[in-house]
Amino acid sequence: MLSLIQRFIELGEGYGDIFELCELAKVNKNRIHRAFIFTSKKESKEYCSIAIALKPINSANFFPIYICREGIPNTNPSTQRLLTFQTTLDDLKIIPVKLDIKHSSIFDDKELFYQYVIGVLRLNHLIPPLQ
């Protein structure tokens, strides 16, 4: 059996990117494995990343996780970008998993950050193991 390739696909952090992520969720609603809201801190400010993980198509071994990384301030009340994502998930009857993670700025490389997040997700059984 081929091992499962789990990879983050990064979108931007603006409104257009949030709408793109929401549209990906709507179009792929039957493929959604989980949705995530990650929070992280940098210089005493909190930021949110939002993501959806999609199940592989047919017998493909690719497990994509689309993400808008750390562009949303975590404020009370929530920003419009976060509310847009939450409304989309509500419409799809999906409850997002909320996790605190390290901010990507503490990693020397963005790929190391994504390996760290994949490790956190696997350890918490939120995405499938490699095989």
Image: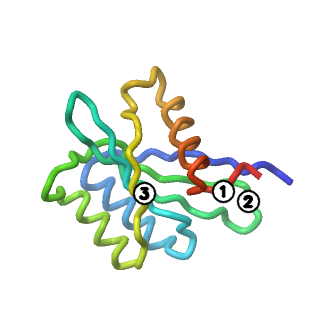
Find the residue positioned furthest to the top: 108
Looking at the rendered structure, the secondary structure element under dot 1 is loop
Cα distance in 3D space between marks 2 and 1? 14 Å
Write down the residue under mark 1.
Answer: 128
Q: Position of residue 26 (x, y in %)?
A: 43, 73
Is the residue 26 above or below the residue 113 in the image?
below
Residue drawn at 23 percent across, 57 percent down: 81
Front-most of residues 44 and 24: 44
Find the residue positioned furthest to the front: 124
Would residue 44 appear left or right of 118 to someone viewing this image? left
Location of the N terminus (image quadrant): bottom right
Residue drawn at 41 percent across, 78 percent down: 93
Q: Could you tell me if the residues under marks 2 and 1 are in contact, i.e. CB atoms within 8 Å?
A: no
The amino acid type, in three-letter code, at marker 3 is Phe
Front-most of residues 72 and 12: 72
The amino acid type, in three-letter code, at marker 2 is Ala
Residue drawn at 24 percent across, 41 percent down: 46
Find the residue positioned furthest to the left: 77
Rendered image: mark on residue 60 = 2
Query: In this rendering, which labeled residue sits more in front, label 2 or label 1?
Result: 1
The amino acid type, in three-letter code, at marker 1 is Pro
Query: Closer to the N terminus: mark 3 or mark 1?
Result: 3
Q: Residues within 10 Å of mark 3 (few under 14, many from 20)?
A: many
Rendered image: mark on residue 36 = 3
